[in-house]
Image (cartoon, helix red, strand yellow):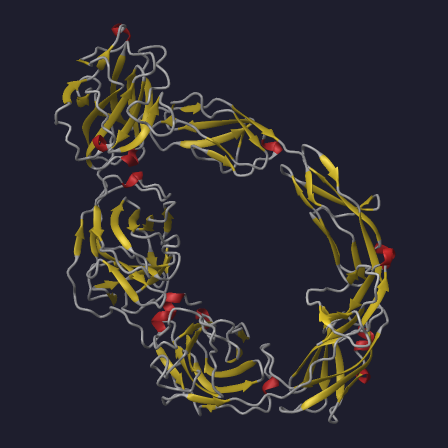
Amino acid sequence: MKMNTMQKRLLGIGFACACGVSVQAQTAVPGTFKHITIDGSFNDWTGVPVAYTAAEGPTNAIQYDNLYIANDETNLYLRFTLYSARPDAFANSYDNLFIDADDNSATGFPVGGIGSEMLIQSGSGYQEKNGGFNEGGINNLGWAIAGSADSLDFEVAVSMAATYASDNTLVFTNNTFAILFEGDNTSYNNVEFAPPSGGLVYTFASNPGALSTNLALITLATSSWELNESGTDLGTNWLAQDYDDTQPGWSSGLGLFGYTPSPGVYPPINTALTNGPATYYFRTHFQWTNDSANLAFVLTNYLSDGAVYYVNGAEFRRVRMPSGVISYSTPAAATNFPAGQADIFGLEGSDLQTGDNILEVEAHQAAGSSGDLVFGLSLTAAPHYAVYNVDTNQPADQTVLAGQPVTFTSDIIGSGPLTYQWLFDGNGIAGANGPTYTIPTVLTNNAGTYTLLVSNSFSSVTTRASVLTVSNTPVSIVSQPVNAVGVEGRPVTFNVVASGTPVLQYQWFYGSTAIGSATNASYTIPALSPTNAGHYFVNVSNPASSTNSTVATLTVLLDTIPPAITSVVAGATEVIIIFSEPVDPVTASSAAHYTISGGVGVSAATPTPGNANQVILTTGTPLAFGTVYSLTVNGVDDLFGNAAATTVSFARDITIDGAFDDWTGLDPVYTTAAPSGNTDAADFEAIYVYNDANYYYFRVTLWTDIVASAGQFPYYVNMFFDTDNDPTTGYSAIGSEMLIQSGYSYQEKNGNFNDGVSINGLNWLCLPAAPGTNFEFRLARSATFQDTTPVFTTNVFQFLFQGMTPGFVVENTAPAGGGTIGYTNMTPMSVPPLPPGKLAIDNLRGGNAAIVWDPPGTLQFSTNIIRPSWTSIPAATSPYVVPASGGSQFFRLSN
């Protein structure tokens, strides 16, 4: 198992944690039963009280503001607002939830005054019921999180069916639990507990029960409303829960309200309104104490003009009102037709709160309709309501440019459970089973009709057929393919950039012949031959048009350059040669073509399968550390008959490849005579260290590795390095300037366990990548701290390794008796650089020339060969086309 970053910081022997504290005062939170949808919209939190308000904390960690808790029969829901935006809240290991599932601080992992049975971090759950930090995983966590666009408001779900992976028992066995929100800084030091101690104690609220018959929440003629017809603009204050609607300007009455020249088309008007105001305000209360799941909340609404509807201060409907901001003087968009016809629509049950609710309506006059204003409604909670299509104009017809998204919407109510199925040209669309349907990228073949079939146990309704029209933009080539010069055996690529509505289709041509499978925006010839020379173009098409690119000419140059050597790596009896290009396997297999100085014989030469540039030599006698050897290669051909004739220098080195023959001849810097007896953690048998000019190399042999199910070395191993050989600086364990955990590096030079920043340029590599007892890894000597100062500043450094169990308990150390292991740098061998490759010049048409070469080496030019002043062209790639200049130019390769 790979450790996450919080686990890593808890491994530190100097971890600062509010653990093991005594029982603290707790904050009790009332239980609230509520169905919450984790979608980043927070209207369904209406009626959930604030559980805790945290003081604004330091800015170097998550800054909790208000915390909320609710539950339904399946999930625990948490909501937190923040003082400052945190787009990655709970996506990293700096933000944590500890849950004391039995509300007993004496059991579980002690932290912040609670006894945590479960930690949630980065969306994963970790068992802690036996008192340890992370004793294993959690199954069925059901984690979901969504945030607001400004990253100041987040909501979370955790399944009440979560179980411990160790024994499959439920986490939430008590009706009451405690929860603690924690925030760390980037040094993994706790900055904030919310609440500061003891946790928030929450008791699950029980399901309030389902309705079996319709329940009238607001009646048309017998429910009392408060109304304001004073002609005064009330802004938005009148929507507040605690707004005083008994103050002057407000009066009471029963519905219907209004005045009309045609009273016979409406139910009786019980409360007359004064003609004149542009907007009338209405408020009424109703009680809700049941479970809202699978109920239809149906409003039967009589309205002559337009209105905006709110529940508990949140808007949920507009009828004949324009979009955008609504003010007192905004006129309704139309009047009702025919007059007296009721509007029927729904209210989401999640918008209701247990207990008292307020329905608020502002009715607006339509322009030129001051002769009447009528308003009144009823609200019914219905467990057996047939499917009803509220807006028969939905889904609307749409015209969309191909490549753009489109969304179809519906407006349907009915008691649940509701089933949705969108249809395209009468056929069901797989996975399209919600009240809306989105096509993220519209294509031409998406044009057609879209309908929605909605059903419940009482009826089904099919909406109107929405017609989707897809328009297209013709193809336009933005960037044309260009002429190319290539060398046989090497690759070349042609590219085109085109625009236009999807789907763009490509077909490349050689001359007038279509190239099979060349149907992408780029076309690559992996290994050129002279027969590839010629003319290339591409046809680009979409449903709207088709066009050809300009013609690009490919010139193919013959390879006349022998292969160069770009790398030599040597172990005890093995020399790995990398050539600059693929070599002929027959000539490369002849040991007679290779000579090593010092009387070292070459017993075999083996080309590497799958890598035509690599040959491995086997030596008859071991190579020695500290010796510079010469390797001469003579007679190894490339694929075009060019024979190598070169001599290079090399020295034996260490290669991190998971094999260990290159360590032969090196003595360990640390050994133990027998295992420690602690078999559930890395138990160190021997440690070897070596360096060259670029790296420190380590080999670690173990008596026992961690259990295979938990991973392998170096997981669950702390490596502390005193890189300045001064125990008085750095982290106090050994004066450590650098910590490495699982290959991740952390600065400690400021005296902390993990200063909160990583090491630059460590170039860590550890092999083999499988459990075992023998491993090798490397560290770059050029590594720097975040301030760019060097990590390794002296010729000597000290180190300490710790092996831990998967429960993060230190069991074994190297050295076993305490202290540190020291290493003094070896003086690296001075090995001459590899000689540069060869180059050739080919004349091209039009007076141009092409410079062809093989690495190593940087291309340089001069305009004077007698007294040359060479200028590097570091960005030049072979072949390099030299434009005709009218004068002489000279080229060379230089190290």
Q: Nearer the viewer, residue 670 or 632?
A: 632
Q: Nearer the viewer, residue 721 or 887?
A: 887
Residue 535, horizontal then vertical, whole percent: 83, 49
Q: Nearer the viewer, residue 752 or 788?
A: 788
Residue 530, horizontal then vertical, whole percent: 86, 58
Q: Which quadrant of the view contains residue 609? A: bottom right
Examine the rendered structure and indicate whether residue 505 appears above or below residue 738: above
Residue 656, horizontal then vertical, whole percent: 58, 78
Residue 438 as seen in the image, left or right of residue 34: right
Q: Nearer the viewer, residue 198 or 477?
A: 477
Question: Which image quarter holds the N terminus?
Answer: bottom left
Residue 155, horizontal then vertical, whole percent: 33, 48
Q: Residue at x 22, y 18 (%)?
A: 220
Examine the rendered structure and indicate whether residue 598 appears above or below residue 460: below
Q: Which quadrant of the view contains residue 49? A: top left
Residue 324 as seen in the image, left or right of residue 578: left
Examine the rendered structure and indicate whether residue 548 appears above or below residue 596: above
Examine the rendered structure and indicate whether residue 42 appears above or below residue 385: below
Question: Which image quarter holds the C terminus?
Answer: bottom right
Residue 202 as seen in the image, left or right of residue 803: left
The answer to whether one can see residue 452 in this image is yes
Number of numbered discs on residues: 0
Q: Which quadrant of the view contains residue 524? A: bottom right
The answer to whether one can see residue 558 in this image is no
